[in-house]
Image: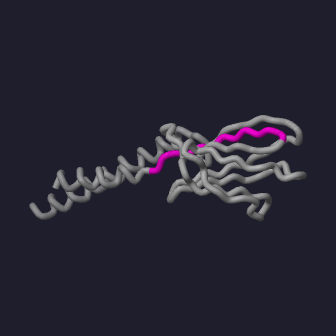
Amino acid sequence: MTAMLLLLALLVAPAAAHGVYMSHEYTPTDVTIKAWYQGGDPMANCDVEITIGNEIYMTGKTDADGYYTFPIKSGTNSYIAKVTEGEHAVAKKVDVVAGGSGGSSGSIFGESLIVNVIAGLGYIIGIAGIILYFQSRKNMKKN
């Protein structure tokens, strides 16, 4: 019984999501975004979608290092960049100042430790509940 619960816990653990992040830098002519996983590995060869308002401006794929560069459209200073790979996705508002340069970084998950703590507690409580359920069934069979 304990072996079965341990196996169940091991099968569930790899499915836990991890954070994905994005930063951007821009020049007067183009914007470069970089997307990476929580551990620092780049989101290589992932789908990219750049939108202006509700319209798709550009699509493409990140390079092997997680970078994607697109030209600044004249008269536009705000974009939404989205990078996806399977169930992993990060989206970020990219603001540019005409004739300037700059950058910032961020995460769709807000880079919050509390989210990870709550998720961990949820797993522990769930596994404890399964163990208690099977123990109560075992005790009922004895009576």
Q: Nearer the viewer, residue 68 or 3?
A: 68
x and y, in percent, of residue 18 in the image:
48, 46
From what the image shows, is residue 92 above or below residue 114? Answer: below
> Is residue 143 something one can see in this rendering?
no
**Residue at x-position 15% and y-position 58%:** 139
The residue nearer to you, when weighing 44 against 97, is: 44
Name the colour scheme.
one colour
- Which corner quadrant of the image does residue 96 belong to? top right
Q: Is residue 95 visible?
A: yes
Quadrant where the N terminus sits is bottom left
User: The C terminus is located in which quarter?
Assistant: bottom left
**40 lies left or right of 122:** right
The quarter of the picture where residue 98 lies is: top right
Residue at the left extreme of this rendering? 142
Q: Residue at x 42, y 44 (%)?
A: 120
Answer with left or right where residue 44 lies relative to residue 102.
Answer: left
Tell me residue 34's x, y (percent): 63, 42
* Magenta-colored stretch includes residue 11: no
Residue drawn where x is 19% and y is 62% of the image: 137
Identified at 71% across, 37% down, the residue is 104
The location of residue 55, given as percent across then percent down, is 77, 64
Q: How many marks?
A: 0
Relative to 129, residue 33 above or below? above
Instruction: Identify the magenta region.
Output: 17-28
- The location of residue 138, given as percent across then percent down, is 15, 59
- Residue 22 colored magenta? yes
